[in-house]
Image: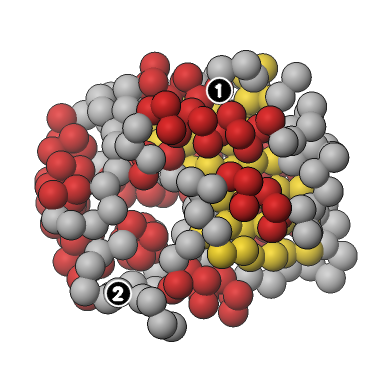
Amino acid sequence: MAGIDASVPHSARIWNYWLGGKDHYPVDQEAGDAYVRVFPGILDIARGQRYFLARAVRYLAGEAGIDQFLDIGTGLPTVDNTHEVAQRVNPACRIVYVDNDPLVLVHARALLGGTSQGVTQYIDADARDPEAVLRQAAETLDLTRPVGLMMLGILGHVTDDEEARSIVRRLLESLPSGSHLVLADGTDTDPAFVEAQRYYNDGGAAPYELRSPERIARFFDGLEMVEPGVVTLPHWRPDMPPLDDGNAHVAEVCGVGRKP
């Protein structure tokens, strides 16, 4: 557990708290509660992103025929993690999780199991070093075959747009045709969200950049978008029609793009 700082809130632990998990510290609960007081909609985003992950992985493991997944910035294990969803569709799926938080590392290695036919692996690496991520992932995944690249809620932590696009580009350049990028990130479309994030960033934790939907869509440059494109969380291939138009209150967009 060396290297874990329980005095500063951490996004993965706060996210775990918002999703009803137990792997967080009082400082994370305090920060999470303060965030919710300013922007209650973050709870809808946390749940909506988890539902999107499940739908996107089911699509990739089923209709798209993807049986390898590289999940970067996975965070703490909760329910319906990538390997669980994928291996329910195809028990032989191979999944590599990537994070660089010591607490995530401890819990992931203890809790992320999987099927006997497939493989579930965890590597300690930083998304800002794509080459190191790919080098370690190649020990488990066959990078000459299509891969589902999962980047949910992670690129906001790379506040410079060019650096963030470079990370995505370098990862995709090393993956073959037929690979897919699954991405979701918060938007600057809700003033309360912007205000809550400003307070959070000013509190000393790792900052997160809210971007416009147009800036987020740029991460898919050069890819073939899977319908319906870049949309708010409830609108990406919902299991049932959203109760309303979704755009008024869900300040996060998502999408899936295929590498030609």
Q: Which residue is mark 2?
A: 5
User: Element at badge 2?
Assistant: loop
Is residue 175 rendered to the left or right of residue 152?
right
Q: Closest to the observer: 71 or 60?
A: 71
Residue at (78% x, 59% y) in the render: 140
Mark 2 or mark 1: which comes first in sequence?
2
Q: Closest to the observer: 206 or 33?
A: 206
Q: In the rendered image, which quarter is residue 97 located in?
A: bottom right
Q: Which residue is mark 1?
A: 220
In what quadrant of the picture does the N terminus appear?
bottom left
Residue 214: image x %, image y %? 39, 17
Residue 67: image x %, image y %? 80, 46
Residue at (78% x, 64% y) in the render: 119
Please identify, in this view, whether the residue under mark 2 or under mark 1 is nearer the observer.
2
- Circles 2, 1 touching at the beta carbon (< 8 Å): no
Residue 34: image x %, image y %? 14, 57
Q: Closest to the observer: 106 or 128?
A: 128
Report whether residue 253 is seen. Answer: no
Is residue 193 rendered to the left or right of residue 97?
left
- The residue carrying pointer 2 sits among few (fewer than 14), some (14 to 19) or many (20 or more) residues within 10 Å by Cα, namely few
User: Element at badge 1?
Assistant: helix
Is residue 31 rendered to the left or right of residue 17?
left
Residue 28's tag is none
Is residue 247 rendered to the left or right of residue 190?
right
Residue 76: image x %, image y %? 47, 65
Q: Amino acid at mark 2?
A: Asp
Residue at (38% x, 49% y) in the render: 46
In what quadrant of the picture does the C terminus appear?
top right
Report whether residue 260 is seen. Answer: yes
Q: Amino acid at mark 1?
A: Phe
